[in-house]
Image (cartoon, rainbow, N blue to C red):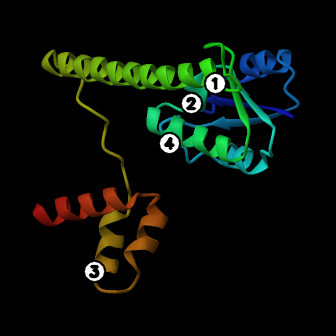
């Protein structure tokens, strides 16, 4: 069975182009994630990896839609290999059913990771230039009305810090950073 995997980075992005491309390649079932490719911890990817059986073929539009780091990519490929499943990437014209395809797969994974590093470097450089020009100040601090009251309640044991974080919709890191800032005033 040909199984397709589609990923876009945000919920606002459309998947139709990738879906159509995979359907043209004879894919019978498609799994779709709307999440960053930085991690292999994606719901549809997990479902697909559980769904795959011996002899199945995973088809993607591009390697970058499947994995962003060479390590994650090679881990996913190892799992496919354990299930005796093949992998096809349309854009890179890779088919792991062939020795040349398996070789090219490793090369493309390394190139994809290199490109990701270049993108990060350019982003850091752009932010630094914008900072020097006074145009970038980072993300604006979140507004959490009721923080001080909930912090006081958690300090005296009326509620737990976890329940206070939930009420405010605040992450653990933000909670403790703001608590330190508040006590440092």
Q: How far separated are the C-alphas under marks 1 and 4?
A: 18 Å
Q: Which residue is mark 3?
A: 155
Helix, strand or loop at label 1? It is loop
Do labels 3 and 1 touch, CB within 8 Å? no
Helix, strand or loop at label 2? It is loop
Helix, strand or loop at label 4? It is loop
178 up-or-down from 97: above or below = below
Q: Which residue is mark 4?
A: 39
Residue 60: percent from the left, percent from the top? Answer: 69, 25
In the rendered image, the quadrant that contains the C terminus is: bottom left
Where, by quadrant of the figure, is residue 151 drawn?
bottom left
Q: What is the number of callouts on the image? A: 4
Residue at 63% across, 24% down: 13
Q: Reading the chain from its start, which is encountered first: label 3 or label 2?
A: 2
Q: Is disc 2 surrounded by few (<14), some (14 to 19) or many (20+) residues within 10 Å?
A: some
Q: How far separated are the C-alphas under marks 3 and 2?
A: 39 Å
Residue at 15% across, 67% down: 183
In the rendered image, the quadrant that contains the N terminus is: top right
Nearer-the-camera pick, 57 or 8: 57
Q: Which residue is mark 2?
A: 9
């Amino acid at each position: 069975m040909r199984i397709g995997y589609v990923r876009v980075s945000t919920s606002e992005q459309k998947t139709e182009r990738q879906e159509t491309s995979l359907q043209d390649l004879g894919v019978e079932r498609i799994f779709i994630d709307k999440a960053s490719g930085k991690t292999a911890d994606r719901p549809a990817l997990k479902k697909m990896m559980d769904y795959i059986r011996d002899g199945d073929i995973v088809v993607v539009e591009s390697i970058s839609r499947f994995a962003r780091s060479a390590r994650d990519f090679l881990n996913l490929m190892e799992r496919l290999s354990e299930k005796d499943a093949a992998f096809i990437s349309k854009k890179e014209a890779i088919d792991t059913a062939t020795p040349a395809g398996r070789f090219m797969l490793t090369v493309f994974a390394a190139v994809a990771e290199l490109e990701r590093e270049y993108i990060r470097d350019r982003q850091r450089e752009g932010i630094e230039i914008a900072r020097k020009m006074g145009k970038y100040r980072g993300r604006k601090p979140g507004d959490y009305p009721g923080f001080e009251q909930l912090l006081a309640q958690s300090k005296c044991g009326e509620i737990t810090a976890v329940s206070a974080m939930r009420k405010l919709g605040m992450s653990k890191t933000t909670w403790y950073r703001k608590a330190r800032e508040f006590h440092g005033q």
